[in-house]
Image (tube, coloured by chain):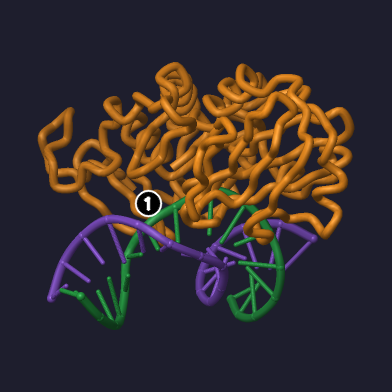
Chain colours: A orange, B purple, C green
Amino acid sequence: MPELPEVQTVVDTLEILIQNKRIVDIDVKYPPIIDNDVNFESNVTNQQFKSFDRKGKFLILGLNDGYLVIHLRMEGKFYVVNQEHTLDKHSHLVFHLDDGQRLIYHDVRKFGRIHYVKQLDKHKGLNRLGLEIWDDKCNVEYLSSSTKRRTIAIKTLLLDQSVISGIGNIYANEILFDSKIDPKLKSNQLTDLELERILISTKEILDLAIEQGGTSIRSYTSQLGVTGRFQQYLKVHGRDGQPCLICNEPIVKEQVNGRGTYFCPKCQKSSK
DNA sequence: AGATCTACCCGCACGC
DNA sequence: TGCGTGCGGGTAGATC
C-alpha cells in the first residue's frame, strides 16, 4: 500500500514519464474517484503536466492552470501505457496524452481520490497536514506541543496527519520499534527524550524507505516495472509470532484504535 | 471548542 | 464452494 516513500517514487517516476505532456482527452470510468463536480473534464482537458510534488501522502501534479491533488489510499497506482494496452476492470480514469500514450489511474479497491483545484490552499486535506519530518521546525518542542495534552496512544498520534504528515501504519510500527517505545503508551506520558528518539527514527526510516523506492506489500507496485525494496528492511511489521530481531521474544500483533499494531513486548515495554 | 470515537467507503484474502 | 469477516487512510458526523 502506498505510503509516503511510495508516493515519492510515483512523483519521481511520473516526472520522467509525462513531464510537459498534454492531456487531449479524459475518460472517467468510475466517477466517485473524482472529488469534483461535473467540471473536472473541462477544467483538466487540454492542460499539460508541468510540476510534480508530494505533500504528506498527497501527490500534487501541477497543470498550466491549477493542480491535480491525488491520494492513492490503499492501492491506487498509475501506469503509462500505449494505445494497444487493454484496460482491466480496475482502470478508473484514463488521460489520453498528446504523444499517443495514456496515463491510467488503477485502483482495485476504489479508495483513492483525485481532486482538481485552481489553488492549492483551496484543498482541505492539504490544509490539514502538519509538518514534514524533514522540516527544521519539526523538533521536540513542536511534537510535545501535540503530545503533552493528548491521551491517545502514541501510535495513533503518529498516524494523525495533522501532527507529522506522511506516517502510515507500516512506518508507525517500524518507528516505534526502532525507538523502543510501547505503541499503546499515552501520548502525554512520553518524555522529551523519547520524543527525540521518535523524531530521529522517523527521519532515518523514511529516508531509507525513499532510497529503497518504498515498500511493496500485497499487490502494490508504484508503477509497472518499479517495485519497492523497503520490505526487506521491515523489522516488526507483519512479523507477529516470529522472534524479535533484537531479543528473540515473539513479536505480538494487537489492534490499537482499530489498526494492526506489531511490537516486541520486551524491547518496547513501558515502564509506566 | 477541542479531543476522541465510530461508521463509512470497497473488494480482496482468508478461514471455517 | 460459499459465506462472513478483517483490513485500512481520511473524513464526516456523533459524542464526550
At horizontal 39% and vertical 33% (from top left) the residue drawn is A175
Q: Name which quarter of the figure residue A31 lies in.
A: bottom right
Within 10 Å of disc 1 (Cα), the crowding (few <14, some 14-19, many 20+) is: many
Give percent across and percent down for residue A211.
Answer: 45, 16
Task: Say which of A234 and A85 sits in front.
Answer: A85
| Quadrant that contains the N terminus of chain A | top left
Question: Would residue A205 appear left or right of A86 to someone viewing this image?
Answer: left
Task: Say which of A3 and A22 sits in front.
Answer: A22
Above-or-below relation of C12 to A16 = below
Question: Would residue A171 appear left or right of A199 to someone viewing this image?
Answer: left
Above-or-below relation of A151 to A67 = below
The residue pinned by badge 1 equals A184
At horizontal 54% and vertical 35% (from top left) the residue drawn is A84
At horizontal 34% and vertical 40% (from top left) the residue drawn is A217
The answer, for residue A201, to whether it is visible in the render is no
**At numbered mark 1, what does the secondary structure look like: helix, strand or loop?**
loop
Above-or-below relation of A267 to B11 = above
